[in-house]
Image (spheres, grey):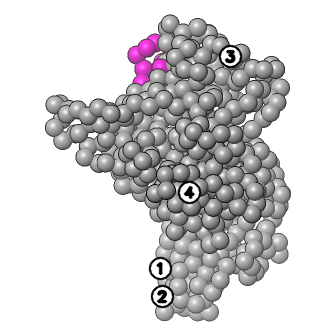
Amino acid sequence: MQSEFNHCNFHRFTLVIATWLSIGSTDAGVFEFAGDKYGAQIITHPTGYYGKGGTLTVTVGISPTSPFISEMATPLQNAIKTWNELIPTTGNVVVPAGDIPDDHYDFESVVLHELGHCLGLSHPNLASESGLSEGDKDYTATTKGANNQFDLNSGPDGIIGSRDDIRGDDVNLHWFYKDSNNPFILPAIIDKTTYSQNLADLPANDQYVANGDRDVSVLFGLPKTEAVMQQGIQEREARRTLTADDVATLRLAMSGLDMLQDTKDDYKVQLQYVGVTDNANIVIAFDDQTAFAACAISGQYIGFNTTHLEVVSGQISLNTGFPWHFNQQPTPATMQLPALAVYANHQPKSIVLTQGEHLTLTLSLDPTTSGGNLADYWVKAETPVGTFWLNDQFQFEASDNPLRAYGGPLVNIDSFTLFDASTANLPPGTYTIRFAVDSNINAIYDGTYEQLITFTINP
C-alpha cells in the first residue's frame, strides 16, 4: 500500500492499492478491495468517478506489443458491448460451445470477466485467493472471522454457495437482494435500500447469502446460469452474457456515494474501445505476466470517504501458453429489456390515501425485443394482513407460496386493472404490489424482471 497527497487538490487524500486477480487460477455481489485490509463495506467505482453524476467513459485498448492483436479486436468489442448494455440473462453457461475447438479457452468469456475486475467488481465466491481447494472455493465470498478460519458447511441441500449454508463467524462480503436473496433476479431499485451485506436482512429461514454459481441456479429452477464474475472457466465453455448478479453489483456502485438510486451523484459507465494503444484506462495484452489471465488494478479513496474507492488504472494480462479461441462473430443487435410498470391512481410512484378514498391499481408491459418469448407472469401483493397472489383466474388469493397468474408469450399490455374501488374495506397500513415476468416458463417464481409500487392507507 502506498499513500500520497494530491497537491493539485488538497481536499483529496489518495490511497493507492494494487492487486492481481485471475479467472483461471483466481470477489458480482462483491467489490474489489473489500475484505480484512480495507473493510468489508468498500464500494469500488470505475476509473474517473469522483462523486459527480453523469456518463463515465472508460477507455479500453490493446497493447501494441501484444500478439493476437487482430484476433482480439472482435471478441473484445463484443465484451465491451455486453458491459455497456448491462442486460441480465439466464442460461448463459454453454458447455461445450459449438464454436470452440476441443481443449481451447474462450477469450471473449475470459476478457468479459477481467473487464469486470477492471470496473471494480470482484468474485462473488471465495475463489483461489482464499487458499481453499476444489469445490470449497465456491462458497460465498467472506473473510475468516474471529476464529481465523473459514467455516464451511453446505447445509441440508448439499449445494455449496446456496442460502442454507452454515458459515459460523465468517464475515460476509457479498451484497444481496434483501427481498429474496436470489442472485438471478433484478429489481427496479438497486441501492442500499434494497441490497445489503447484513445477514440480519436475509429473508426468513435463509441462513446465508446465495451467490451466482451455476449449481445454485438450478435450485432456483433455472437452466445453468453463472455470474460472469464467478471464478473459473472450463475448456470449450462460453459465458459471454451477464447475469442479474453482475448487473446489480455494477448498478449498486452506479448509485453513487450516497448509494441511493436516481440522485444527482448517480453515473452510467460507458466502455470505449480505442484500438491498438497503451494510452487507455484499461490496456489488454498477451504478455505472459500471469499464469492464465489476470487484471492488475490500482485504486484510491474518493476524497476523505473511506468506504468508496475509484479504480485508477487497469492492466489485463493473458498467457500465450494456452490454446485460445477468438470468436469472430460480432454480437447481434442490442436486445432491449421488457419494460414493466405498476401504477397507483395512474402514478408510477408511491402514494398515501385515507381509508375510504378511491384506489385504482393497474399494470403495463412492453415486451420490446423479447416479444413472443415464453415467460411466467406473477403479481404479488404484500399487505398488512398477509401475502396475496393474482391467480390464473385473475383473482387475488392468499398464499404463502407463489401462485402464477399466467404462463405464455410476452405480449404488449397497455393497461391491466388489478383493483378499482374504494379503500373502505382495506385495512390501514402499507401495501406493496410487485409485477414480475421470468425469462423462462416453468411455473417457478424467479421474477427475472420486476417492478413494484407501494401505497399507504391511513385511518
| Distance from Cα at disc 3 to Cα at disc 2 | 66 Å
Q: Earlier in the sequence, mark 2 or mark 1?
A: 1
Name which residue lies at 46% across and 27% down: 296
Disc 3: which residue: 322
Disc 2: which residue: 458
Where residue 22 is drawn, which disc sits there? none
Up-down relation of residue 123 to residue 376 (above or below)? above
Disc 4: which residue: 176
- How crowded is the residue under tag 3: few (<14 C-alpha within 10 Å), some, or many (20+)? few
> Taking 213 as reference, is 35 left or right?
left
Q: Position of residue 247 (x, y in %)?
A: 57, 45
Mark 2 in CB contact with mark 1 (< 8 angstroms): yes
> Taking 117 as reference, is 96 left or right?
right
Q: Position of residue 197 (x, y in %)?
A: 49, 58
| Distance from Cα at disc 3 to Cα at disc 1 | 61 Å
| Distance from Cα at disc 2 to Cα at disc 4 | 32 Å
- Is 86 or 363 nearer to us in this picture? 86
SS under mark 3: loop
SS under mark 1: strand
- Residues in magenta? 272-283
- How crowded is the residue under tag 2: few (<14 C-alpha within 10 Å), some, or many (20+)? few
Kind of residue at badge 3? Phe
Where residue 352 is drawn, which disc sits there? 1
Q: Position of residue 319 (x, y in %)?
A: 60, 16
Q: Position of residue 93 (x, y in %)?
A: 75, 38
